[in-house]
Every structure is written in C-alpha cells, then in structure tokens.
Image (cartoon, grey):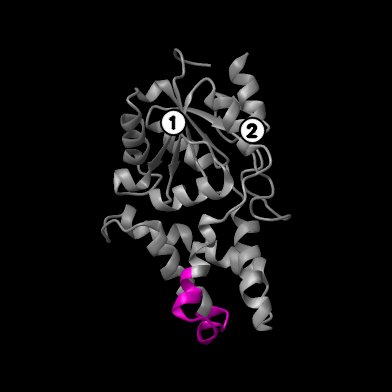
C-alpha cells in the first residue's frame, strides 16, 4: 500500500454500505400492495435509480445550482410514477412517504460489524451524494456507526467532482493521502484516486439484482481489494 498511515476512511453509501434496491422495492410493494395495485417493485426501484445520475449531471455541469438529493429523488419519483401510470394513485403524503424509502435502506449483512471494527482504529465518515438529513435517517434506521456525515452537501456538488472528496477530507482535518475512499463502484474510486485519496474496492455483485454486469471486479489499481467490510477491517489490521 502506498503512502504513510491511514487516519480516516470515507465511504460511498448507496450500494456499498446499504442495499438500495431491496429497500426501495420493499417499500414500493408495501405501499401499492394494500391498494391492490400491481407493480413490479424491483423494476420500479431500478427505474427510479436509473434517474439518479442524469438528475445530478445538471448540478455537476453547472446548469443548475446545488439542490439536495432528497429533492432530486422526489422529482425523479414524479417522473417514474407517470411512466408507470401511477401518478393518480399517489397523493402528496404518499409521495413524501415513498421518497423517504431512501432513508430506510437495509445495510448489507457485513456493514454494521465491519464499520464497527474499522471505527475502532480509524475515523469513519460518509462521502455520499445523499444529504446530511438522508444520511442521518439511514444511520438511525440501520444502526450505522458513523463519526461524521460528509459528502455532497458540504461541497455543494455531487460526486464525481473532486471537491466532494476534498471537502470531505478537509472536514475530517486530514490530508488526502491519509484518507481511504471505500466504494463498490470503480468510477467513484477513479475520481477519489485522482483527487489524491487512497482507495479500497468492495464488490457488491447483487446491488443491481441477480443479472448485474457492472462493478463485479476491480478495474483500477486500488490500494486494497476486499471481499466485504469485515475483510477490509482484517486486511487493514494486518
């Protein structure tokens, strides 16, 4: 591993630490099933998530000022409800409840014990596109033991802009090469590496469902490749 001692770890959250697809699909089914509305909840979750990167692009490109991901998720939900022919079945209260599905995502089985093990040696924080309020909701829901909630909101932009990583590192009080970015997404790690951070890849081969084809293996020269967060904790303790 290059460089000196690591003092802090930053984590991607959606997909790396929590299972967004299962959580969103569960809440979509829980909302529509009692209404006797037939919805493919996993297809709905996939379509909603599919709007994620395009919605942030305008902010990253400067065409739109920063707005929290909660707002982008709600705007995308409006679009998806219309695409699924469900716009007239969900009132404003229902839309708000569905949008908070992103605060009720289950951690992967290794996430809480892995983060707890890592926290015993390092400062651990989010580096997520989610807002601080969204990350707080996820932490309370899933028992995620973060030391700090950092990322897009403090940088007023979205990954993979370098300032998101660098502002998060600055907020921790460390230098970039003292901090390791942990993610299940190679593109996230390429951006973090370009910003001077160290990197760890954690595959989540079912993040996008059973037919996932992306991010099944590392595609860059990352400092660490681990099976999961418990394995990462073990490797960093060696």
Which is the main secondary structure of the residues drawn in magenta? helix
Q: Quadrant of the rendered structure where residue 160 is?
A: top left
Q: Is residue 122 visible from the viewing direction of this image?
A: yes
Along the horizontal axis of the image, is 87 left or right of 171? right
Q: Is 104 above or below relative to 187?
A: below
- Mark 2 nearby-residue class (10 Å; few <14, some 14–19, many ≥20): some
Closer to the camera in the image, 127 or 197? 127
| Range drawn in magenta | 82-96
Residue, x 64% and y 64% (percent of image)? 25
Residue, x 67% and y 37% (percent of image)? 110
Q: Is 30 above or below relative to 36?
A: above
Closer to the camera in the image, 117 or 167? 117
Q: Position of residue 54 (x, y in %)?
A: 43, 61
Mark 2, secondary structure of its residue: helix
The tag earlier along the polypeptide, 2 or 1, is 2
> Considering the image in quadrants, where does the C terminus appear?
top right
* Residue that carries the numbered disc 1 in the rendered image: 193
Along the horizontal axis of the image, is 141 left or right of 40? left
Mark 1, secondary structure of its residue: helix
- Mark 1 nearby-residue class (10 Å; few <14, some 14–19, many ≥20): many
Q: Disc 2 versus disc 1: distance between alpha carbons? A: 26 Å
Q: Is residue 131 visible from the viewing direction of this image?
A: no
Q: Is 76 above or below relative to 10?
A: below
Along the horizontal axis of the image, is 167 left or right of 99? left
Query: Is disc 2 in contact with disc 1, using a CB cutoff of under 8 Å?
Result: no
Residue, x 54% and y 22% (percent of image)? 120
Q: State yes or no: residue 192 in magenta.
A: no
Q: Position of residue 119 (x, y in %)?
A: 53, 26
* Residue that carries the numbered disc 2 in the rendered image: 113
Q: Position of residue 115 (x, y in %)?
A: 57, 32
Q: Position of residue 43 (x, y in %)?
A: 64, 68
Looking at this view, name the residue that lies furthest to the right.
Answer: 210
């Amino acid at each position: 591993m290059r460089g000196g001692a690591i003092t802090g770890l930053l984590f991607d959250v959606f997909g790396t630490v929590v299972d967004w697809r299962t959580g969103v699909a569960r809440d979509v089914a829980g909302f529509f099933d009692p209404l006797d509305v037939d919805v493919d909840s996993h297809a709905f979750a996939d379509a909603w998530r599919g709007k994620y990167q395009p919605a942030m692009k305008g902010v990253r490109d400067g065409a739109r000022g920063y707005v929290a991901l909660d707002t982008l998720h709600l705007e995308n939900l409006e679009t998806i409800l219309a695409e699924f022919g469900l716009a007239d079945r969900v009132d404003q209260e229902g839309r708000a409840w569905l949008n908070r599905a992103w605060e009720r995502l289950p951690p992967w089985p290794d996430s809480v014990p892995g983060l707890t093990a890592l926290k015993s040696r390092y400062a651990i924080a989010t580096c997520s596109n989610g807002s601080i309020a969204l990350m707080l909701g996820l932490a309370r829901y899933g028992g995620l033991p973060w030391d700090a909630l950092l990322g897009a909101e403090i940088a007023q932009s979205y990954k993979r802009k370098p300032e998101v990583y660098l502002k998060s590192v600055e907020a921790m009080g460390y230098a970039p090469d003292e901090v390791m970015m942990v993610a299940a997404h190679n593109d996230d790690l390429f951006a973090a590496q370009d910003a001077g951070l160290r990197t760890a890849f954690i595959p989540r081969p079912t993040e996008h469902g059973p037919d996932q084809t992306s991010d099944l293996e590392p595609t860059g020269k990352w400092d660490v490749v681990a099976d999961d967060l418990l394995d990462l904790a073990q490797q960093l303790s060696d």
